Each structure stands twice: as C-alpha cells, then as structure tokens.
Image (cartoon, grey):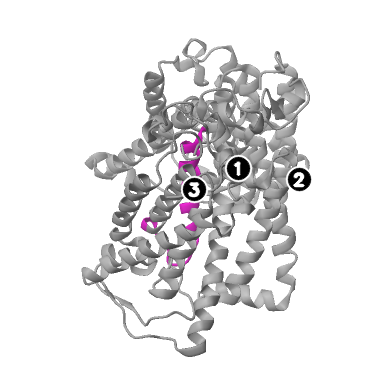
Amino acid sequence: MTEPEATGAALPASQDVPTSTGSGGIRGIFVGPRGIRPGWRLLIFVAILAALQFIVVQNGMRRIPAARELIRQAQSGAPMGPDFQFLFETTALTLTSLAIWIMSRIERRPFGTYGVPLQSAFGKLFWQGVIWGLAFETLEIFGIYALGGYSFGSIALAGPTLLKYAIAWAIGFVLVGLFEESLFRSYAQYTLASGIGFWPAAFLISGLFGATHLLNQGEGWVGALSVFCFGIFGCFTLRRTGNLWFVIGFHAATDYAESFIYSTPDSGLLVRGHLLNSTFHGPTWLTGGTIGPEGSVMDFVVFALAFALFARVYRPKENGARA
Amino acid sequence: MASESSSTVSHFSVSTPAKSPSLLEMICKDPNAIRSGWPFLIYFVLVLIFRQITIYAFGHLGPITAWLRSQPTTVITAGPLIFTECASFLQVLLAALLMVKIEKRPFGEYGLPVEQAFGKRFWQGVPFGFGMMSLLMALIGVFHGYTFEGISARGTDIFKYAILYGIGFLFVGFFEEYAFRGFAQAKLGAGLGFWPSALVLSFFFGFIHLGNSGEANIGAFMAGSFGLLALFTLKRTGSLWFAVGMHAAFDWTETYFYGVPDSGLLAQGHLLGGSFHGPDWLTGGTVGPEGSYLVFVVLVASAVAIHFMFPAKEPAQV
C-alpha cells in the first residue's frame, strides 16, 4: 500500500483536489499545481476537529451533569469504567469521522479513500487483526510470565458481571481502535503522505501518537516508544492491506487483552471490571512497571516478531492492492 | 492471507505494472519522501543526536561543567548565553551541512547563502529589530506602563556588555532562525506548502518557548507570531539574513539596551533601567514586554513595513 505518488509520476486524478486554473497571488498561497496544498488540507482538518471538540466537548458535554461527573472521575486517577470509555470514545470517534467526512466533501473523494472503507467494516481483515492482536498480547504476557514477572492470580469476576464487563470492554476497545486509528492513520496519514511521502508521514504521526500517550497518568517514555512502534506497525498493515480494518481489529484486541483479559495497566491506565487478579513482580524492564506491558522489553521483542511475520504473511501484491 | 476488494484498497495502494517493489524500494523510491519527508526526518534526528551529545558533553567536561553549573540561573549572563547558543547553532548547522553533503545541494538553498553573510539584508534587519522593540517600549510608555529611570551600566561595562550580548544574541538569531526556518522549513515547505509548513514550525517555535523559565502562554504565542514574521521576511527576501539581524537586534534591544525581562529573566549588566507598572496585558508582567498585548500591534506594523520594503516579485512562487 502506498499513497498515490509512490509511482514516481505526478499525482493521479484521484489525488487532486479539484480547483480552477491559476495559482498566482493570494490564491497561490493555498493552491498549488495539484490543487489545495497538502499542508492546508491538514490544517483545515485539524481546525475542524478542534472546533468540533471545543463546541461539543468543552461547551456541550461539560454542561451535562452526568457527563461532567464521568470526566471528573476519569481525571481523578481512579480506574476507568466502561461508561466513561463509551462516552469519550464514541464522542471522539463521531467528531473525528465528521471532520474526515467534511474533508471528503471538500476534496470530493469517497469517505473510504482515507483508509476506513465502510463496505469493508468488520470484515475479514478486521477479524484477522483481532486474532493477531490477541495472539500478540498473549505471547507478550506469557513471555513475561515465563521470566517470572507475571502471575495470573485468581478469577476476579463471575457470572453476569463477568459477561457484562467482557462485552462492555470489547465494545469499548473497538471504539478505541476505531477512534485512534481514524485520528492518526486515516485522513492525517493520507494527507501528510501526499506531501512528504508515506513513511516519513508514518514516522511523524507515530511520533505524535506516542507523545500524546505521555499525557496518560503512569505512562513513561518507554511506553511512548512502544506506542510509536505500534503506530509504525499500524502504518505497515495499512501499506500492505490497503486499509485500516486490520489494525483497528489489532488495536482493539491488544488493548482488550491487556486491560480486561490479562488485567494489566494499558499505557499506565487501569480499568474497572477486569477478569483476573493478576500481579507483576520483578524488574521494571521486564514488567513495564506502572506503564504496563507496553513498558516491558518483551513488548519490543514481540513487535519485532509481529513485523517479520506480517511482512511474510501479507506480501505486496504483484498488481496493486498490497504494494 | 486475504485482502479486501480492490475498490476499497486502491486509494492507499498503487498498481505496479511489473514486479512489485521491495519494502526498501518503496521507502527509497517515493518521490515526495525523497524530496521532502526523508531529508526532514533525517535532519530532525541528526539535530536530536547532536543535541544529546552536547548535553552529555556539557555534563562531563570537567571545567566546562563546573563553570556552567556555577552560573546564576535567575539572570541572563553573557558568557553562558554565548557558549550555549553557539553550541546550539553548531548542532543545527552541522546537521544541515551533513544533509547538503548527502543531497549534493548547495548550502545556500536553505536560507543562509554564505555570499550574503552579514551583507545588506542582515544590516537592514538589525535596525528593523531595534525599531520593533523600541516601538513596543514606546507604546507601553505611552499607556503609562513603563517609566525610564536612567542608565544602569557604568564605564567600560557599557561597551563590554554591549559587545558580549551582541555576540550572544547573534547566536540566538542564528540558532533559532536556522533551526525553525532554515533546512526544516525548506523541506517541510516543499511537501506541505510554504505557509502550512510555516504555521506548523512557528507553532512548535512558540511551544518550545514555554520551556523557558518565566515564559507564559502569551509570550509563547508572541514567539510563534514572531516566527511567522521571520518567515514572511524569508519569503520576501529569499534568505534568512534579514531575519537573523532582526531577531538578534530585537532580543539585544530588549535584554541589554532597555534592560527589561526577556522571557521572565533580566540580564546581568544591562544598559538602561526602568520600571513597569500597570496591568499585565500592557506590561507583560513578569514575562517582560514580549508578554504585552501591544506586541501584536508591533508585529502587524512590522509585517506591513516588510510588505512595502520587499514587494513580492513572483506571486506564483509559494
């Protein structure tokens, strides 16, 4: 998978943002020979997103007492519940999708152009991603366990409560996958790549992806580096599969396995209502400390394996889809 | 493994008529990446590496480490200013020199053509920067926010500190202009467009000013706006020499000449003395004049002046 310019030729018609002729004067600041300049498109997207966030979150949700209380609880550092997850991720996903949709109208491209084609929603690639994600996290946790850094402990939930949280967190983390992948690797990746190339864009956006996770309580630079690797892996799957559905499934499954199944901190965040009473013990390089498995050296080992295996399994296609 | 239908993947994919490229080929043969993205990223990484080496060296070079640690941190002093800013400029300069060597392109393409060094544009920028800060101080004074209280420095100190701070702020000008508006702007601008890149880099320029002790949001916003003005001069003059002179003179005039806080810190051995009184929006409070709202009046007036001083020659070239 590449952005269109990878052919070495000028942008194909699908990449141009339709404009009338001429690019001099004030107009030339905004419009280049291939239409609206990529930087402006990206800045317009960011501005729309910021405006939507300001209107809906800052001036809408915070005025609703129940939502305000959920936000307050989340900011207090207490373990996060699925109710906050639903509220936050659904809102964030809706706003991001709306911003991408607006850009797709401005650019006169189908929404699916930006990596999340709706006709492929929750299709084969998504479920392959889920399996890969569960396997990834399982391998990592068992690696830490084998080196004596993790104990599974007892089962923490039972009966209907177990079922409730199992389903609630599954939905919650699918929302996380959808939101974070849409925000970082959909329109932003597509547009930045059209200006500076696919992989440089991937590195810059993954760096930003990692840096934003530093805002989480309990997160550290090793965890942020792990998130960066995750971003690069996500871009690699985008490159090879042509869309984001694999990495959405992968993202949701790794977070779900980490937070709910193996009941460990995820980017420094603990959740309320997890499966096991598990414990970490041993050096931070092995367990990740407060960051969780993302801060473990095992995370990078498993990422290296995942890259190698993915490159072998999802090969570039001879003609098209997977370059 | 299966893939989705071609209709869903084609926009992020490319048809290759014959053999599909390897990962290395994909990385190396992407024209936008070669023109813009990779040089920018490699330059950025090189600067980070050189910066870490410098920080490590400053912490482990016996006498230098001891000297730096003995310096006061609550005031600006000329020696450390010259030393650290020179080192910072060398980091970005070395990274850029390596990049031009790799790219086999002339160094002058990236904002500081050597043949124009300290020439007409630089010396136009110096009085311009002095005038900008003087206008700001005058405006604050007109609104009764500043009272001039005479000359603080005496005898040979006047000349000594004038020269030392001149050198120090020249390095500040070189470092900050080249780091944010030299190689990085050229490469990012080639990919994103000049002004989108200018906005992004100016945002980061403002953002990193928040790391200065004593800096506030308004001061950081001013720094970002100053960055846009400097980029406007780059656009109109074709080089950074005007901006380097303007930047150096602006800081020198603020810190040494008027002796007012620069990002919240006063300079040891400044020329004039005075006191601020009035609301923070007028005086900038503890941040100094760069935290005053009037700075935006000065920046707009400066942009208008630059527009007329250096008319656009080729409007299509953005």
Q: Nearer the viewer, residue A299 or A236?
A: A236
- Residue at 58% x, 12% y is B120
Badge 1: chain ID: B
Q: Are labels 3 and 2 assigned to the same chain?
A: yes
Q: SS of the residue at dot 3? A: loop
Q: Which residue is mark 2?
A: B144
Q: Name which residue type carries label 1.
A: Ser
Q: Name which residue type carries label 2.
A: His
Image-based side of A251 in relation to B297, left or right: left
Q: Position of residue B158 (x, y in %)?
A: 50, 29
The C terminus of chain B lies in which quarter of the figure? top right
The answer to whether mark 3 and mark 2 are in CB contact below 8 A is no
Q: Of the residues under marks 1 and 2, which one precedes in the sequence? A: 1
**Is residue A208 in the magenta section?**
yes
Report whether residue B261 is seen.
no
Q: Name which residue type carries label 3.
A: Ser
The label shown at residue B3 is: 3
Q: Which residue is mark 1?
A: B7
Q: Which-is-in-front pick, marks 3 and 2?
A: 3
Q: Are labels 1 and 3 assigned to the same chain?
A: yes
Outermost top residue: B115
Which residues fall within the magenta stretch?
A197-222
Q: Main secondary structure of the magenta part?
A: helix
Query: Dot 3, how many residues are within 10 Å of its Cα: few (below 14), some (14-19), or many (20+)?
Result: some
Outermost bottom residue: A159
Measured in 3D between alpha carbons, the distance from the residue under mark 3 to the one under mark 2, in whole angstroms, is 71 Å
Q: Position of residue A256 (x, y in %)?
A: 46, 69
